Amino acid sequence: MGDRGLAAHPVIPREQSDRRRAVMENSKQRFIEAQRWMLDRHGVTASSRFVSLASRDDHAHVLTCGDGPDVVLLNGVGLPGAMWAPLMATLAGFRLHAVDLPGFGLTDATNFDARDQRRSAVRFLGEVLDALELDRVSIVANSLGSLWASWFAIERPERVSALVHAGCPALVLGASAPLPLRLLSARPLGRLLTRLQPPSPAQVEKFSRMAGEHPLEPELVDLLVATESLPDYRQTFLTTLNSVLRLRGSRPRFRMTAEQLQTIEQPTLIFWGEDDPFGSPDVGVRMVQLMPRAQMRVIGGGHAPWLTQAAVMGPAIMTFLHRNG
């Protein structure tokens, strides 16, 4: 009995545990350096801070810069807040808060339940705003961040003054994702594919082509490689994909439906990259027809259009938020 008990709970040698901690710390330091290089590249001076989440023992990482009305920026699955740097540089006169989503960048994911994603996302965003002492904000979002922002606007409308979507929102009106992401969403195929293609500049460039955004500036490539090398990234990324996607498309229970879009009363500005592989501009046209106060602009670029179109988007966002924020 004693032998079996010891076998079930093996003791990890101290030197192995120390090596693991060293690897984890090195990966975080590499991310922090890559984040700083990305911000410096675009002349963004931001404070990096961690805020405590009330309902659990987790912390969210937030980059804050500027002064003025508060704007929260939310990125897509697997992407860090610092990726917003090109757009942040164009939004003078606002206090910007770029938030790393749970398990990506430096935000903890210990108690985030991707299976109950809508409830968890709304709770996460509410607790981040509480920790930042923000009652009501505008939100600029991309992809999965846009889906979360839409859920939050529906369930907590008093806390959202306006929405800006940069690229096709995830799962809107049945939109799905390119085949490579759908393959990664399938277990155990996703685990195998990520082992065969570990984080590297070549792997990041391959995914940037899939997203219609290529080439990437060197600092962004370094940032994304560092992001994917963080300890919790791989498991969180695959779990999140599996929760919202399947091989044949999006999971119905998380789709943003026409009925849901009709309930979003906040003024909404949508930028749609003409080469966005996640959904054609026709999807955006349908969104505008359904939403009470929405407008759309088709611009160059793919799924992350601010990477090349920040000079176009920035002034339009500032005008929109000054009128509606």
Image (spheres, rainbow, N blue to C red):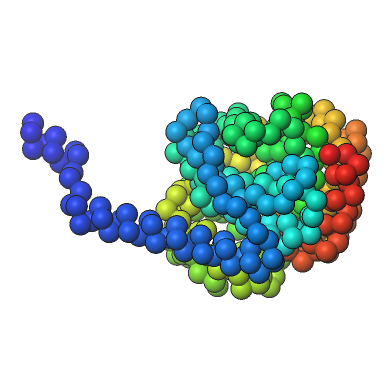
Q: Quadrant of residue 287?
A: top right
Picture coordinates of residue 46, whole percent (x, y): 63, 55
Depth check, front residue: 322 or 28: 322
Relative to 91, does residue 258 appear above or below in the rendering?
above
Most extreme residue toward the front is 67
State whether residue 157 is above or below residue 206. Answer: above
Q: Residue at x 42, y 53 (%)?
A: 231
Quadrant of the snapshot with the C terminus: top right
Query: Which residue occupies 65% across, 49% down?
Result: 64
Tell me the quadrant of the picture where the N terminus can be found. top left
Q: Is residue 75 visible?
A: no
**Residue 168 on image: x %, y %:** 76, 50
Q: Position of residue 153 (x, y in %)?
A: 75, 32
Name the foreground residue: 264 vs 61.
61
- Tell me if 5 is positioned left or right of 282 in this view: left
- Tell me where residue 171 appears, x and y as whole percent: 71, 42
Residue, far left? 2
Quadrant assignment, res 117 = top right
Is 314 drawn above or below residue 53 in the view shown?
below
Residue pictured at 38% horizontal, 56% vertical: 24
Q: Residue at x 77, y 52 (%)?
A: 166
